[in-house]
């Protein structure tokens, strides 16, 4: 079954939006198979955002993402990668469709409430990158 990695970003955790955000995924019939609250390390974030390493905002992004704890979720379901991207909305909350998580809870282009993997391949890679930090067991069928 397809899986994806979601990060509820630091500002959304600070604002106590974790329950509301998880409910949105569950209302869309997606299954939360793992959830872990953790302070992200810069090592993991640099791997997670490796494709953005040349961007001018890279260092600021890594520093924001490790500014306080986030909640990392693994979701499972048919077409879960694409479904989560739709539910999350556009990267820029100002351009996100009404009803999406980023429209409702995002603040800025960077401080935009949630992350969702871009493709099935990226999802598998991100789950490996975060696996130890979020204590998601190797070989876990769940
Ligand atoms: N980001 C940023 N400045 C930008 C573009 C993106 O700080 O100009 C941050 C933002 O938090 C975004 C993350 O970098 O969610 C990853 O960027 P990407 O383009 O992959 O967007 P996403 O896949 O998260 O929608
Ligand atoms: Mg992306």
Image (cartoon, helix red, strand yellow):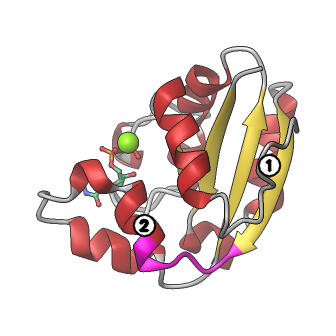
Q: Residues within 10 Å of mark 2 (few under 14, many from 20)?
A: some
Can you give x and y, in whole percent of width and height, for residue 6 in the image?
62, 48
Q: Is residue 119 left or right of residue 5?
A: left
Question: Label 1: which residue?
Answer: 22
Res. 82 visible in picture:
yes
Q: Is residue 97 above or below residue 82?
A: below
Q: Is residue 114 above or below residue 96?
A: below
Indicate the secondary structure of the residue bearing disc 1.
helix
User: Quadrant of the rendered structure where residue 123 is?
Assistant: top right
Q: Residue at x 58, y 55 (%)?
A: 105
Q: Residue at x 72, y 52 (%)?
A: 73
Q: Quadrant of the N terminus?
A: top right
Q: Quadrant of the C terminus?
A: top right
Query: Of 27 and 60, which appears nearest the observer?
Result: 60
Q: Is residue 86 left or right of residue 48?
A: right
Q: How many marks?
A: 2
Q: Which mark is residue 125?
A: none
Q: Residue at x 78, y 22 (%)?
A: 77
Q: Which residues are magenta?
A: 38-43
Q: Which mark is residue 45?
A: 2
Res. 117 visible in picture:
no
């Amino acid at each position: 079954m397809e899986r994806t990695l979601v990060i509820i970003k630091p500002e959304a955790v600070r604002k106590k939006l974790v329950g509301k955000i998880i409910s949105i995924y569950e209302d869309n019939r997606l299954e939360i198979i793992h959830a872990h609250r953790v302070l992200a390390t810069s090592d993991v974030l640099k791997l997670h955002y490796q494709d953005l390493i040349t961007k001018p905002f890279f260092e600021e992004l890594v520093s924001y993402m490790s500014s306080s704890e986030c909640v990392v979720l693994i979701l499972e379901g048919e077409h879960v990668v694409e479904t989560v991207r739709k539910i999350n909305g556009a990267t820029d909350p100002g351009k996100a469709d009404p009803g999406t998580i980023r429209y409702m809870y995002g603040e800025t282009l960077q401080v935009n409430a949630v992350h969702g993997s871009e493709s099935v391949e990226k999802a598998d890679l991100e789950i490996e990158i975060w696996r130890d930090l979020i204590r998601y067991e190797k070989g876990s069928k769940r």
